[in-house]
Image (cartoon, coloured by chain):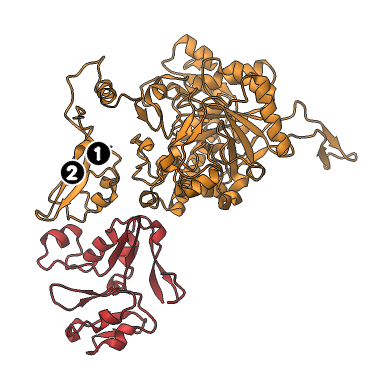
Amino acid sequence: MRRIVVKPEVCMNCHLCEVWCVVAHSKSKDIIKAFLYEERKPLPRLIVEESRPESFALQCKHCDEPDCIFACISGALYKDEEGRVLHDESKCVACYSCIMACPYGAIKINPLTGKILKCDLCVDLGFPPCVEKCPNNALEYVEVEIGAEES
Amino acid sequence: MFSHLLPEFIVERRDDRCIRCRACERQCSFEVHRYDEELDRMFSDEKRCVGCQRCAVLCPTGALIVRPHPGEYRRNANWTGERIQDLKKQAETGGVVLTGSGNDKPYRIYWDHIVLNASQVTNPSIDPLREPMELRTFLGRKPDVLELRFNGGDYEDVEIATELHPNVMIETPIVFSAMSYGALSYQAFKALAMAASEYGTLFNTGEGGLPRELRKYGKNAIVQCASGRFGVDPEYLNCAAVIEIKIGQGAKPGIGGHLPGEKVTLPISVTRMIPEGTDALSPAPQHDIYSIEDLSMLIYALKEATNYEKPVSVKIAAVHNVAAIASGMVRAGADIIAIDGLRGGTGAAPKIIRDNVGIPIELALAAVDRRLREEGIRNKCSILVAGGFRCSADVVKAIALGADAVYIGTPALVAMGCTLCQKCYTGKCNWGICTQDPYLSRRLNPEIGAKRLVNLLRAWSLEIKEMLGGMGINAIESLRGNRDHLRGVGLEDWELEVLGIKGAGE
C-alpha cells in the first residue's frame, strides 16, 4: 500500500506538515478559519521530531501487523480493506494501550477528548496534504513495504 | 558598543492572518522572529532582518511582509543612507565592510542599451517550433585551417585531415559559473552538478575541489586550479571536461579568497586537502605566475598532466588592459579565456572592491574579441564571459559581441532560492545555498534545486531560439561575433566604438 515515507536529510523543521494536517482535519478546511476561528481547533496527527540539526515528521506507519490493533482493548483501532490503520473514536475508551504498544511513538493523546489521535492518511482528501505541502519534498507518499523503510 | 545602525527592513505581520505556527521563527537564521507563549504572540527584532524573504515565502497564510524600512536619514544625494550606514559600521568595527553577491551600484548596464535585430520582408524569420535550431557549442581551440580528405572520387566519404584540438560540446551556450564547495553548501554544489549533467552543459567547481563521490559528474565539470591549489590532484584534473586556471574574479579583481576555518568542516577539509577547521586562504596572485611566460608553464604543466586531452581555460577579471592580457593568455596556450566582469558575484568580498574595481563585461568582451580578431588568433580560443547576465537576451547579445558561451552564477543561485540579500559572507544563508550549517543547508533539496536549474536552462534556451529565429538565424554559430545584429540606444560615440556596433537607425 501507499505509505508516507520521510526523508530526514531534507526535512527543514518548518512544521508546515503539522499546520496542513490541522487544516485537513478541521471543519472548514481553511487555514485561517481553522486556526483562528474554529471553536474546537483540530490538532495535528503527526509529530515533528526535532534535535537540531536533525528533524523529521513522524506519523503512523500503518504497519502490516500493527501492534496497536493487537493491543486495543475496545476494538476502536482497525484496519480497513486498503490496509490503513484507522481509529473509531466512538469506541475508544482512552486506555492508551495502543500508545504503549506503538513501536514508533506515532500515537498522541488528544488533550481535548482524552482519547487518541493518529494519522488517517487523509482518506477523504485522496492525497495527504502533509506530503503535498512539504516545501522541500521531505515527505513522500509512495508504495512501500513496511520494514523495507529506513526509519 | 551601542550600535547607531538603523534597521534596514521592516517586518509587518498581519495579525488577522498569523496562526502562530512559528514557521518564520524556525526558518530565520538571523533570529528575527520570536514567539511569546504567555501572550500567544509573535514578535520581530527588525534590526537583525536582512530582507532575504525566507519567512515571507514560507509563511503558510501570507501574513508577513518584509520591506525596506521607511525610517531613513535626511535625504542627501551625496551622503546616501548606504554611505552613512557603512561609515557607522566601520566606526563600530574598525574593519573592512564585507559583502556578498555582485556589484549593486548603478553603473551603466550596456545590455539595456543594446537592441537586437529581426528579419522583415527582405529575409525570412524562422519559427523555432517548426524548424531545427542549433544551440550546440564547442569550447576549445579551433584549427587555423581545416583540411578535408576525400576518399574516392565521390564526395560521400570525407575525413577531417587536420589534427583537431580537444573541444568540449555543450548543448546550450550557458555554463554555470565557478562556485566552490565551501562557499556553497554541498546540496547547492551537487544541484549544479546534477543539472549540468542532465542538460548537457558544464558546471565549475570553483577553487574548492570536487568531492570524490561527485567525480561521476566530472565529464560536465570545469575544474579550477586556483592560487590556493585546493583539492588539486591528478584524478581531479583527469576526471574533468575542462581545466581552468583562476587568476581573478570579477567581484574582487586583485583580491584572494578566504574561507574561514569554521566553514572548513570535515568533508570540506577532505575535499580541499587541508586540516579541518583551518582557514582556507587563497593568495591574491598565483605565486608561480608573475608573467605570461609563467602562465604558459602552468598551462602546459596541466596539459601534460592530462595528456593534452582537455582544453585549458584561464579566467581573469575584466580590468583596464583586458584585451592585451587576453592576447597574451591565448599566446601562452589557453584554449578558453574566461572573463569575469564588474558585476560578477562572490560569496564574500570587501564591499569597496566589489563596488569599485573592474570594468563592465560588455566593454571587456567587445575589446577582447576585436583584439583577438585583429591579431588573427580569435580561432585559437573560445571566449567565456561572466558577470551580471540576467536573462537570455543578455546571452544573445554577448554571443553577438563575440562570446562563445556565457557563465551564469547569480541566475543559477536565484533559481535555487537566492534573493540577493548579499549576506553570503555570514554563512547564515536562510536558503541553504551559501552555508555550511547542517540545519540550514538541508533546506536545499538537491533534486529540487537541479530541477529548477534544468528548467532555467531550458527556458533560456527556448528564448534564445526564439530570438535567433526572429533574426533569421538557425544556429548559434552564425550569431557569434555578428555585431550587425546589434544596435546601440542612448550610447555615446566612444561606447559604440568600443562595442563595435552602430547606433540604432544606422
Where A132 falls versus B336 (above or below)? Answer: below
Residue A133 in sight: yes
Where B144 falls versus B490 (above or below)? Answer: below
Pointers 2 and 1 in contact (C-beta within 8 Å): yes
At label 2, the amino acid type is Ser
Q: Locate residue B99, reporting x and y percent.
A: 36, 30
Where B68 falls versus A129 (above or below)? Answer: above
Image side of residue A146 versus residue B466, left or right: left
Tell me which chain appears orange: B
In the rendered image, residues at marks 2 and 1 fall on the same chain: yes
Quarter location, residue A22: bottom left
The residue labelled by disc 2 is B44
Quadrant of the image containing the N terminus of chain B: top left
* Residue lying at 60% horizontally and 51% vertically, measured from the top left: B216
Where B305 falls versus B108 (above or below)? Answer: below
Subunit under mark 2: B
- Between residue B478 and residue A132, name the one nearer to us: A132
Look at the image and give the colour of chain A. red
* Residue lying at 36% horizontally and 36% vertically, measured from the top left: B420
Residue B330 in sight: no
Query: Which label was assigned to residue B49?
Result: 1
At label 1, the amino acid type is Cys
Q: Locate residue A4, reporting x and y percent.
A: 37, 69
- Between residue B124 and residue B160, name the one nearer to us: B160
- Between residue B368 and residue B307, name the one nearer to us: B307
